[in-house]
Structures are given as structure tokens and as C-alpha cells.
Amino acid sequence: MNTILVPTDFSEVARNASIYATEFAKALNSRILLYHAYHLPVVPTADAPAPAMIDTEELENDNMRLLRKEASYLSTHSGVQIDCLATEGFAVDEIIAIEAEHKPDLIIMGITTAGPLAEFVFGSIATDVMSKTHTPVIIVPENAHYKKVERIVFASDYKMEADSDELATLKHIIKNFNAKLYILNVEKQKEDIEVDKALLMMKIENYFDDIEHTHHLPIDNDLIHGLNTFIDVHEIDLIAMIPHKHNFLARMFHESSTKKMAFHTRIPLLTLRPPRVK
């Protein structure tokens, strides 16, 4: 894993995620690409808001100075190589464009969990990136601080088509941290294991046969509660899932399950994607 893209808006939430990212990068021997999207100032006019008259080169330089200052702070505390990049535009569009150009192996972003309004407004950038990117993303809640990843839960319903390419990032992280893997399916009621489900369980079992792992099928009518209970009991450090439309977490909400998990968990969430072709 060579490069981790870390978007920032210089907020405390972003600073916390950036610190998490640098520690994560240090453990994986990766470099950080610290990125910031900025806007041209807008001033009101009689007809409609309009961009202010400003030296765009100076604006870019100002944002790069802020980025380098942030990078210096992060590098001093971690020793990780940090490169800086700033562009003008809307954050989500620019992050996806940077991802396509620089092809990072992982994206790490912060997210605030301070109530429903914050969930809608501040969460939109992180979750929009998560839904549009071709790169695995780690969403770091505002109160989640870095600790060595020793226990990871992979949330699966054994109904999705788990592709080994999608699981490659998870396996890489597990091996580099020498972490234990818990494969979890929270069920609302006890179900017989159907043939397709059994075959997928076997496929996942074979893929992780060289890693310490266990399978768990707890029963809980509230799937969020079931997952969070498991996280607390087993002291999980990272949640991983594949954000397909029809995985078991999608049954909990009308919208994306991974989006809701990003707001309702207290530990980082890793959404898996197939590795981008370099």
C-alpha cells in the first residue's frame, strides 16, 4: 500500500482523521497525499451572488501554505512522508478527480456525529466520496482516536458476491497489523444455512485460510444494536464492509447502510472496493 489520500478542510474533525491516517500510514509504510479543495470567495450583488475579484494564484498559494503547515504538524508527530495538493472546486468532485489521477490505495476521511443536522450537512462529503469512489475508504468518527488495529470485524450477510479483489485491501491490512478477523452476520432470527450461503461462507473461509479468524452469527432484532454489542464485547478496532445495495446492513435503513454506519458507530469504518487498475 503506497499512497493514502487524506482530504482535509482544516477542521478539528479533519485534524483527528489526519492524525489517524498518519499513524495508519506509518504502520503500513505508506505515504500521505494531504489534499484540500477550496472555493473562490463569493460576494452578493443586486442580481445574484458572484465570484469576488481575487488573484487566483495568490488564493492557491494561501491554501498551499495552510496545507504545508498542517503537513508539518502531522509529519513532526509521525515521521511519515506527506505531500500536499490543493485545487479549486467542489470537494466531492475534486476528491474523485484527484483519486482518478493519483490512484491512491486508500482514502481516509473524518466525519462528525454531532446530531441529525450535522449528519446531513457535514457527513455528506465523506459519505458522498464513499459512495462514488473506486478506492477503499476509512471513515473516522470525530471521537475515534488512533490505536493499533488488533481486531477487525467484517460485516457480511453471506448473500453478496464477495469478490477476492474487494477483500484484498482488508487482507492486506490484517496481515500488516497482524490483526484477528471476526466475520459477522447479525440475524433477526435463526435461519437455516442455504446452499448459496454455505458456498459463500466456504469461499470467504478459503480466502482467509491463512489468517486467524472466526465466524459469528448472533441473533438480534435490531441489527445496529447487534453489531455495536459485538463491537463492545470483542473490543473491535475497525469495521469493514462491502457497500453493495443488498447486503445485510441495507435492511436496517432505506438509504445506504454504510452511510448510516458511518454516523452510528464509535470506531472507524472501512468500505471495500476492488483495487483500481494502476
Image: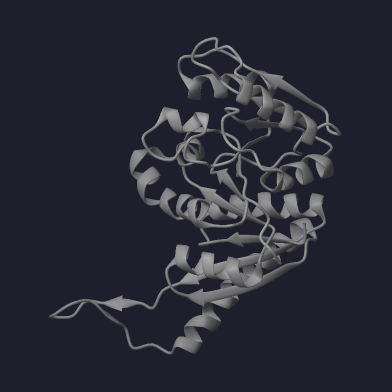
In the shown orientation, is residue 51 left or right of residue 223?
left
Q: Is residue 267 left or right of residue 58?
A: right
* Residue 7 vertical placement versus 167 (above, below): below
Residue at figure coordinates x 43%, y 48% from the top left? 123
**x and y percentages locating residue 240 in the rendered image:** 63, 38
Kindly identify the residue that appears in the image at 50 percent across and 20 percent down: 225
Residue 234: tell me if it is visible.
yes
Q: Is residue 112 left or right of residue 138?
A: left
Judge whether residue 68 can be spotted in this image.
Answer: no
Residue 185 placement (x, y as % from top left): 60, 23
Quadrant where the N terminus sits is bottom right
Residue sitting farthest toward the right: 210
Rendering quarter of residue 66: bottom right
Specify the farthest residue to the front. 195
Q: Is residue 251 above or below residue 66?
A: above
Q: Residue at 69% across / 63% down in the picture?
A: 277
Name the spot of residue 68 as percent of width and height, x first: 64, 72
Closer to us: 150 or 144:
150
Q: Quadrant for residue 276, please give it.
A: bottom right
Is residue 240 or residue 27 the one in the foreground? Answer: 240
How far across and how far down the image is residue 12, in percent? 53, 53
Q: Residue at x 47, y 45 (%)?
A: 112
